[in-house]
Image: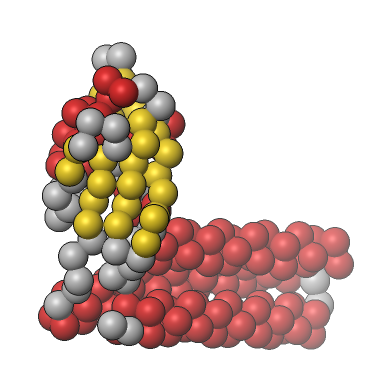
Amino acid sequence: MEEDLQFVFDSAKEAMDKALERLDHELARIRAGKASPSMLGSVQVEYYGSMTPLKNVANVNTPDSKTLQIQPFEKGLLEEIEKGIMRANLGFNPMNDGKVVRISIPPLTEERRRDLVKQSKAVAEQAKVSIRNARKDANDEIKALQKDGMSEDVAKGGEDDIQTQTTDYSARVDTLVSAKEVDIMTI
C-alpha cells in the first residue's frame, strides 16, 4: 500500500510539474515590450513545399531590446520569412534588407500592457486548474486505495500531503505570474 501511495504522489507531482512547465512556456510567449526570440515561436515558414518552424530555417537574434534580427540559413528564404511573420499575425512589420529580416518592436501602450497582464492571469488560472485536477485525480486514487484496504488514517494523511503539494504549486504559479506582471508593466 505504501508503494501505491508513493506512486499517487509521484504522478500528482509530475502532472503539477507539467502544468508549471506549460505556464512558463506560455508566459514566455507573452511579450513584455522587450525583444525576445520566443516571440516568433509560432511563426511557420514555407520551406520546399512544407510549413516549417522559423527556428529550423533561420537564426533569431536580439541585437538590442527593441529589435529582432532573423538571419536565414538560405538567402532565398527572406521573402518567405517575411510572409510567415505576417501570416502569424503578431502585429509586427518585418523589414528585409536583402541579408536579414529586422523587426522593430513597438513600445506597448498602457492599455496593451493591461491586456497582456489579463492574458498572463488567464494563463495562470489554466495552470491552477490543471494543478487542482491533478489533486482531484490523486485524491480519487487514494480513495480507491482505501477501498482496497488502506487504513483511513494513512489515506487522510495522503490527502493532506496532496493538498500541501497543491498549495505549494499554486503559490509557485502566483510567483511566476507576479514576476511576469512586473515585467509587463515596467516601461
Q: Residue at x 40, y 27 (%)?
A: 73
In the rendered image, the vertical position of residue 35 relative to residue 60, given as above or below: below
Q: Taking the image as drawn, is residue 145 in sight?
A: no
**Rendered residue at 23%/51% (across/down):** 103
Give residue 8's quadrant in the image. Answer: bottom right
Looking at the rendered image, the quarter that the C terminus falls into is bottom left
Relative to 12, is 120 on the left or the right?
left
Name which residue lies at 35% across and 65% down. Answer: 65
In the image, residue 66 sits, relative to residue 110, either above or below, namely above
Q: Tell me how the rendering is colored.
A: secondary structure
Residue 58 position, x and y percent, is 39, 34
Question: Residue 98: x percent and y percent?
Answer: 23, 31
Query: From this viewpoint, is residue 25 visible?
Result: yes
Determine whether, in the image, residue 98 is placed left or right of residue 53. Answer: left
Residue 37: x and y, percent? Answer: 39, 52
The quarter of the image holding the N terminus is bottom right
Q: Nearer the viewer, residue 55 or 133?
A: 55
The quadrant in which residue 59 appears is top left
**Vertical order, 70 against 143 (above or below):** above
State the residue in front, 182 or 141.
182
Q: Is residue 19 left or right of residue 3?
A: left
Foreground of the two, 4 or 176: 176
> Residue 115's x, y, as percent?
19, 76
* Residue drawn at the location 22% of the way across and 57% of the way down: 104
| Image quadrant assignment for residue 186 | bottom left
Q: How many marks?
A: 0
Q: Residue furthest top?
A: 48
